Image: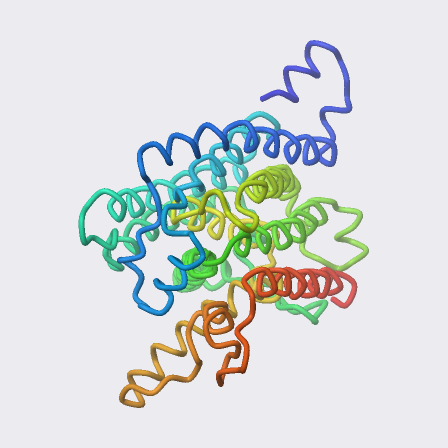
Amino acid sequence: MIPGLLEELFGVSLFGYITFRAVAAALTAFVLALLFGKPVIEWLRRHKVGEDTTKVDSKELADLTVKMGKKNTPTMGGSFLIASLVGSALLWGRLDNLHLVLGIFLTVGFAAVGFVDDYKKLTIPNCKGLTPKAKMLGLSIVAGGVIAALCYYALTTGRDTLLTLYPPFFKDVAFGLASMGVLGVLFFLFFQWLVVVGTSNACNITDGLDGLAAGCMLISGAALSVFCYVTGRPDWTGYLRLPHIAAASEMAVMGGALCGACMGFLWYNAFPAKVFMGDSGSLPLGGLLAWMAVVSKQELVLPLIGFVFFAELGSSWLQTRYFRASGGKRLFTCAPIHHGLQLKGGIFAPAAVPWHEVTIVVRAWIVAGICALASLALLKVR
């Protein structure tokens, strides 16, 4: 919106460069989050939209939450985070780019599902929000619509690359699903649905400590912004033997908005947090991260790019399956992993001293940074 107007009014070509607009989107989202954050937090506090420890499954965790003074900390901070992200993307992104428009639609749709979930938790006595089936249905409808639109666009314009999967480590190996007919397209739809909804839930599970989800998202989002930009450059993709998606670079602008919004949210969410993210923030952030991976054809590298998120998701999934299969035994001290470290000091066995929340978060950021750098190294390895 802004780039076209500025170029038209002043004839300044600088506003047409994606790198400039990505930085501008990050700065704009950061400032918006700072501006929106304070009044939103005050409004949430006045209306007592705070953490309800009675709705936490673990009594030990609920007691720790009360002990650390988090009981009345406002939640639903994801509302101003997502508003800043989307507002910045609308200002600096090209709205004639399908990938960007679908990314905005996905983000807003997932935010709506998360908002309803948070609202029910906080306003209805003894309610834990949407049921798992209802939440999954809402996410699936939004994700399915976005992925189906991408499939339709790819098939009607002959852009088969959009429906192709590219495994890492191999230069000339690709799985062209469009050439497999209806079954190939259906598999693409299912696989990408799994990527988007799974990553959304992974971010949701990770959102449990001050600054954990937002900090890791900032790091992973920055890495995927690089992937999106490189994927849209024919010279770089030609040299690196990567798939070229001409319109993918525009998603780097939204990636910049994602990073800026997370930085602004961290201003208020850093320990001790003045506000929590809630499902209204974690679900759309995870969905957008996955969408950037889909657009840049890095779906198979996404578990490395967002390693912390998938480790948290995997620990919860394994704990549940092992508990049922073993008749009540636990594989981990507590799942997800960050709560095991927080309560027990260890993942598989209790330690003498539990980890402090800040220690867990900072070390998670370090792990996220290492994995993000490793994923970027695959650009050259491939």
Residue 244 percent coordinates (x, y): 68, 50
Horizontal side of 41 relative to 6 (left or right) equals left
Q: Is residue 316 left or right of residue 160?
A: left
Which residue appears farthest toward the bottom when viewing the image? 326
Query: Residue 99, position in %: x, y?
Result: 54, 41
Residue 57 pos. (x, y %): 30, 66
In the figure, 251 relative to 175: above or below?
Answer: above
Q: Can residue 175 be seen in this snapshot?
A: no
- Quarter of the image for the C terminus: give it: bottom right
Residue displayed at 69% across by 9% down: 9
Of residues 266 and 142, which is closer to you in this image? 266
Which quarter shows the N terminus? Answer: top right
User: Residue 12 at what x, y percent from top left?
Assistant: 77, 17
Left or right for 364, reference 325: right
Q: Using the image as rendered, state which of residue 336 and residue 83 is in the foreground.
A: 336
Q: Residue furthest left?
A: 125
Nearest the viewer among 83 and 95 is: 83
Q: Number of numbered discs present?
A: 0
Residue in the picture at 35% in, 64% down: 63
Residue 79 visible: yes
